[in-house]
Structures are given as C-alpha cells and as structure tokens.
Amino acid sequence: MPSTQPPFPAAQRSASLRLLLDQPDLGMRLIMGTDAQIAGEVTWAHPSELLDPSAYLRPGELLCTVGSALLSREASHRLCLAVAHTESAGICFGLGDVSEHVPAALVEAAESFSLPLVTIPSGVPFTRLNDLLQAARDGSGRESLPAAGASASALVTGRVLDLIGSGLASPQALAREVSVAGLDPDQLVVGVWPALAVDRVAALLQGQRALLARTEQNTLTVTGAVSTPELSANIGEMPRGFSAPGPLVNLPGALSAAQLAYARASRADPGVGPEQRTSLVGLLHQQSDETLAPFLEQLIRPLAEVDAQRDSQLVNTLRIFLRCEGSLQETARATFLHVNSVRHRLSRIHEVTGRDPLSYADRVSLHIGLWAFDRVRQYRGAAVQAQR
C-alpha cells in the first residue's frame, strides 16, 4: 500500500529559508540570521543585479544576486537598505560567478540592517530555489532536487562568460569549469555561434573536452586548439567565429575576438538558403552602419543612457520582451517581475523613445535599433581588446 506520508516532514513543509538550507543538493550556507528569520516564509527567489530592486521586490521574497553591481561599500549598503525596506526574506549571494567569497561590505551591511544572508555555490541556478519552494507549498516536494541538466549548466556558463566579457568578473571565475572539462588553461579557443544552434553544437561536443554556454545573443564554446578545426568542419555552412588559442587570463580578449569574427562572418553571409536570406536578420546584415544609425541613436541610445543614470534595465527588458515575441506574461516569467511591472517598463520605453513596444510596427523599429546596438557593441569591444 503506498505511503500517505507527505514528502517533507511536517516541520519542514513551510517554504522557508530553513527548508532551503536543509537541502544537501543545494549546498547553501547560512552567514547570518536568527532562528525566527530562518523559519519565516519565503514566497519567491527573486534574481536581480539592481542596486535598488525595491520597485520590483515584494515582501517575503529572497533577493538573489551574484554581486556584479556590489563594487563599493556604498553599493552594498544601498542594496541592503532596499531589501530591508521591502520586508524581504533576505539575501542569497551566488558564489563563483563574480566572487568566490561574500564581500565583507555586504556582510557588514546585512548585519547592520538585521537581514538574513545565505550563500549558494557556483553552478546551482537560482531557479532551483523556486522549484523547491513551489514543491513545498503544493505538497509535491522531493527530498532533494534533481541535478541541473546540460541546458541549465550552459546558461550558468553563459552568465559567467557575459560577466567576464563585460569586465565584471575575473577569468578565474571559469577556472574550475575549465579544469573539470579537462581543458588546457593555456590553450583555450572561444567559439561564437548562432543562438539557435545550441542543440546542434551540443550534439557535436558529446565526448569532447569542451564547455558549452548560452547567452541571449549566441551559443558559445570553449575548446582546445586541437578540437576546434574538427568542430568547425562538422557544423556545416553556418556563421561562426573563433579566437586564437590563448591562456585563461586572456579570455576577455578571446571573447571579443570571437564575437568580431562571428559578426563579420554573419554580415558577409547571413545564410545559405532562401529562408535565411529572406529573414529580418538576414536583411539587417546587408545594411550599412549609416542606414541603421538612426534606429540606434534615436531609439536605443536614449534607453541606454537612462539605464546608466538610473539602473532601470530598460534595454534588457526590451530585449527579453522582443525575444518573448511581445508576450507580457512570458516576459514577466523571464524577468521574475509582475506583469504590471513589465507594463510599467514598457510604458517608460514608450516615453523615452516615442515608440510603443505594444505596437507591432513600433516593435519592429525597436528590434532593428537593438540589433544595431548589439552589432556596434561587438565591434567596439573587439577594437578595445585589440588595442591592449
């Protein structure tokens, strides 16, 4: 006769920090927090790199961050003030992506505001916390969570590479993954591929010494110098770009070089079949910088300036909204925001640019501007690295 005993003991069924800390598969560690705080309900794990997420953070939510914006003591104080102001459940700091240790300034600020502070090890996505919290609430929880799949691992690696490429993390943040993959840290080659090629590239990497990564724009690979030619030959006629072999410390330059090579390959030949040549991206690759400049300067540049001044995440929200094909619900899920918060950001984009993201025609214009914005960033990033 099947057991009717709930999967979590009665004392653990509450969706709380204690529940998360007691899961050995998560590897979380308590830095500070009282028994009462640890036993309090956690409604959601809310990933954010904003210094002031108070506009989007709700009471009972656990703020999850890798600390990419915590570059000063004042930044840590500002973050903890925002979390305390919203009566959130505390802060979960992701180790490894930016820092191997919790910043001392963050510990000090959390203590001053009496905030619970926990850590989660590198390689464990924040989304796994929500899986367990939801399971505890609906009574379908498991004793432990399944290991993250290859897709989740690729997303984590992609996030690390994004941070390294933007200068927010040291190349050493990827050292452990390079070692586990059996790669020579002095002979690393970065490859950039179309985003939709991730499954095809993953299949080719089976049994190879390599790292696979996914970002919003591309599929990325980190391989050795020997396996790269074979990988390139087997992928067929598809735009891709590679860096020269180099040491781990030069990873930012390798990323920029591979991105520049990919951009040039894509622009020279956006596709080999009629389907590719009649796509919007295929058409954009054939346009000059002068043709695209008004879309960039009048639509996206003003959004980027507002983001730089207020850390408002308008460009990123627009990018995700376009990727979600204009769906408010899907955008809310992808950004861990309420639908009304997404509407507010889109309304702000409308105010700044004069184009309404909810209008199909205006959405196409914004898509063109964002594509041009990304292309310019790729070229400039590569140029800066080449001068070093």
Image (tube, rainbow, N blue to C red):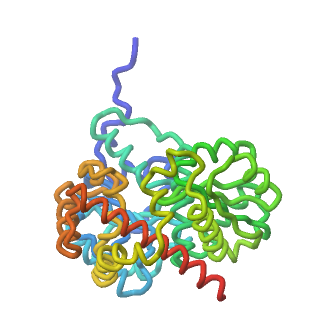
Q: Is residue 290 left or right of residue 303?
A: right
Quarter holding the N terminus is top left
Q: Position of residue 42 (x, y in %)?
A: 28, 53
Q: Quadrant of residue 257?
A: bottom right
Q: Residue furthest top?
A: 1
Quarter holding the C terminus is bottom right
Q: Can residue 33 be seen? A: no
The residue depicted at 76 percent of the width and 67 percent of the height is 185
Q: Nearer the viewer, residue 299 or 153?
A: 299
Q: Can residue 201 be seen? A: yes
The residue depicted at 37 percent of the width and 48 percent of the height is 19
Q: Is residue 7 left or right of residue 96?
A: left
Q: Is residue 4 above or below residue 46?
A: above
Q: Position of residue 4 (x, y in %)?
A: 34, 21
Q: Quadrant of residue 87?
A: bottom left
Q: Position of residue 228 (x, y in %)?
A: 76, 57
Q: Residue furthest right?
A: 226
